[in-house]
Image (spheres, rainbow, N blue to C red):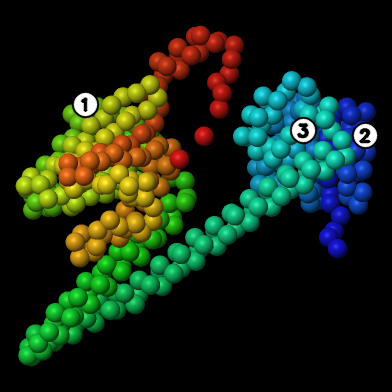
Amino acid sequence: MTSPKALLVVDDSEADREIIALTVGAAFPRAVIHRADHPFAARDICARQAIDCVLTDYNMPEMDGVALAGELKAAHPYLPIVLMTNFGDEMLAAEALRSGVSDYIPKSRITADSIQRTVDRAIHVCVQARLIDEQRAEIENFAYALAHDFKQPIRQIMTFSQLIADEAQAHEVGAIGQHLTFLGDAARRLGKLVDVMLQYTLLNEPPELDDIDLSRVLASVRTSLGPYLAERGAELVAPRHAVRLRGNETLLTQVLQNLVMNGLQYNRSPVPRVEITAHSRADHWLIEIRDNGLGIEAEYLADIFKPLVRLHTAAEYAGSGLGLTLARKAIVAQKGAIWCESTPGLGSVFHLRLPLAHAARPSAQKARGAARPSRRPAAAA
């Protein structure tokens, strides 16, 4: 038999508090019903003992129900919180759901049945959220440990295959030398795949965002790809005007390097060419990476960002099958979006949408503030 639930009713009105507590008691006959007449008292109760769900009024002195929910969620991330609202507060409740409240219920609709459904639903949602986070953390730890453990045998395979190849040079070994070369190449590919898988796992952590200069990012990309550009006789064209955006410089460098490399690699043109342009919009930059490569069939465009999807064999073009997946995760982590348009035989265009730099927004903020001086600014693949 499950242990009785511990429920907390928070309301500064004694009459409302008692009525709601009686209704909650009727919905959960075995539950222990705690009462708090002030948000500070509710905070203290939750700090002292385990509470299965908090039902809090919105209108209270010194701290409203949404602010209380924010404090409780900061201290107890998986605590179910139900906001009780008065008539006409539905818009407020919708906003509260984005601020940590698990669910809401209008006071006028509180019955034993409705409160039971609402509390059970809030508890279920929080239990599932905890389970998902725990499983995600477990998977990340497992992937990190697995990647770390894989690196040592991979290094040994590469080292010993090279030692055997060096020894074999002094003897007539036929095809053995070639086989050892294949073995070393396979080990290097496996090592790169492990590195990419580790990157994929670690990208679940939110990166630090800052105002960055796109020209600085592209200069780094050009330096990294310089030898390949020279080898292929390729062209990389970058925007000349200043572009200041909000993002993570390291992640954006990796994304652009990957997209430029793809445009040059999957390319049979006499002069492979990648052109990067940037267009300013009201609240974001639209960056386009256009190449004259092979292009992508329309039927595959929806799949190219999925993990381990390859449109060509490893013998045709080297790659891990995770490059575009990582690019998408990195752009989404920077609060942006990425998509692709392509014409087979003519090339592809990858579109990146990234926020404006904070320093580029003051005029718009001042304009909004002048239009609505009495309003506070409101607070999202």
Dot 2 or dot 1, earlier in sequence: 2
Is residue 214 in view?
no
- Residue located at (79% from left, 24% from top): 86
Task: Give the image location of residue 40, x and y in percent.
Answer: 78, 35
Residue 224: image x %, image y %? Answer: 19, 50
The CA span between labels 3 and 2 is 17 Å
Dividing the image into 4 quarters, which one contains the C terminus?
top left
Residue in view at x 33 percent, y 29 percent: 285
Note whether 292 is above or below 358 in the view shown.
below
Spatial CA distance of label 2 from label 1 is 66 Å
- For residue 151, what is the image quadrant? bottom left
Q: Which residue is at the front of the view, 211 or 194?
A: 194
On residue 241, the disc is 1
Number of callouts in the render?
Answer: 3
Query: Which type of secondary structure does the marked residue at label 1 adopt?
Result: loop
What is the quadrant of the N terminus in the image?
bottom right
Q: Residue at x 73, y 45 (%)?
A: 121
Of all residues shown, which one is farthest toward the front?
A: 299
Q: Is residue 135 visible?
A: yes
Secondary element type, mark 3:
strand
Estimate the x, y position of residue 307 in percent, counting from the top left.
38, 56
Packing grade of label 1 (10 A; few <14, some 14-19, many >=20) is: few
Q: Of the two numbered discs 1 and 3 on the same chain, state the one appearing first in sequence.
A: 3
Which residue position is annotated with label 3? Answer: 105
* Amino acid type of the residue that numbered disc 3 sits on in the rendered structure: Ile
> Residue 18, which numbered label?
2
Question: Does residue 314 appear to the left or right of 53 in the view shown?
Answer: left
Q: Nearer the viewer, residue 91 or 311?
A: 311
Label 3 CA crowd tier, 10 Å (few <14, some 14–19, many 20+): many
The residue depicted at 31 percent of the width and 53 percent of the height is 323
- Kindly identify the amino acid type of the residue bearing the numbered disc 2: Glu
Quarter-of-image position of residue 312 = bottom left
